Amino acid sequence: MRVDPCFFCGRPAWPSKGITFMRNDGKSFRFCRSKCHKNFKMKRNPRKLKWTKAYRKNAGKEMVVDSTLQFAARRNVPVRYDRELFAKTVKAMERISEIRQRRERIFYKRRMAGKRAREVAAARKLVAENEHLLPRLRGSEKRRLAELAQETGQDVEELEREELAKKAASKKTKAFGGEAKRLRVRTDGGVEEISERVAGGGLVDEDDDDENDFEDVDDDDEMDTD
């Protein structure tokens, strides 16, 4: 059973699956799915689409030169059936697939080597270019942290980072919940401060809650007396 690769993306097109397109000149094109068939009819270049094998090979993301890839080449040479040769071929296919997978893992590790260092270098460059956007400490706060570091023996930079993290956490606003205060002017001219809870986008007066609680208690007492 031969598994032909997709003409557009390079994925395996299994027998009885996918689409086969026969051109007027007699050439056949195998596609693994309708997505590849539609892109082929729209005359798109597979080397410019990131999800195809051709793009990954041109970008150096997959092995191109390897001895294990030569075994997948099609050979239109008739061979006389031999049972021993057939058994050896099946074992060789399994062994070749294992070797190819191991080499692909090694190729991936070599390709991704140094990626973490490059990401850190890019992040440091970004911080250096936009240093004016970072939060800063005042001179008095720096002096206070320096004195604290001398007393406790801790690192000044570590204390500054902790202080900046505290400031960033304190600036975060809550979406729901909290407490709001307002002033109420009484009829005699006095001013009274009232605290209200903010729940679900609305204000809840604590006095109203107390009144409702008293009303509920009165109703229960009436029920008990009856």
Image: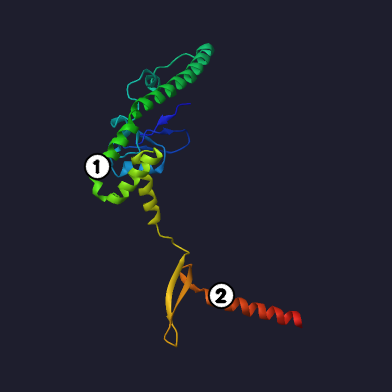
Looking at the rendered structure, the kind of residue marked 1 is: Ala
Residue 80 position, x and y percent, is 47, 13
Residue at point 48% right, 72% down? 196
Q: Quadrant of residue 185?
A: bottom left
Which secondary structure lies at badge 1?
helix
Residue 38 visible in the picture: no
Which secondary structure lies at badge 2?
helix
Is residue 125 rendered to the left or right of residue 216?
Answer: left
Q: Quadrant of residue 58?
A: top left
Q: Mark 1–mark 2 contact, CB under 8 Å?
A: no
Residue 148 visible in the picture: yes
Nearest the camera: 193 or 31? 193
Q: Which mark is residue 128?
A: 1
Task: Classify 11 as above or below 171.
Answer: above
Nearest the camera: 146 or 164? 146
Residue at point 46% right, 22% down? 97
Nearest the camera: 107 or 151? 151
Is residue 142 rendered to the left or right of residue 222?
Answer: left
Residue 159 position, x and y percent, is 37, 43
Mark 1 or mark 2, earlier in chain: 1
Residue 139 position, x and y percent, is 27, 50
Residue 199 position, x and y percent, is 49, 67
Task: Classify 3 as above or below 214.
Answer: above
Q: Which mark is residue 209?
A: 2
Cα gap from disc 1 to disc 2, whole angstroms: 54 Å
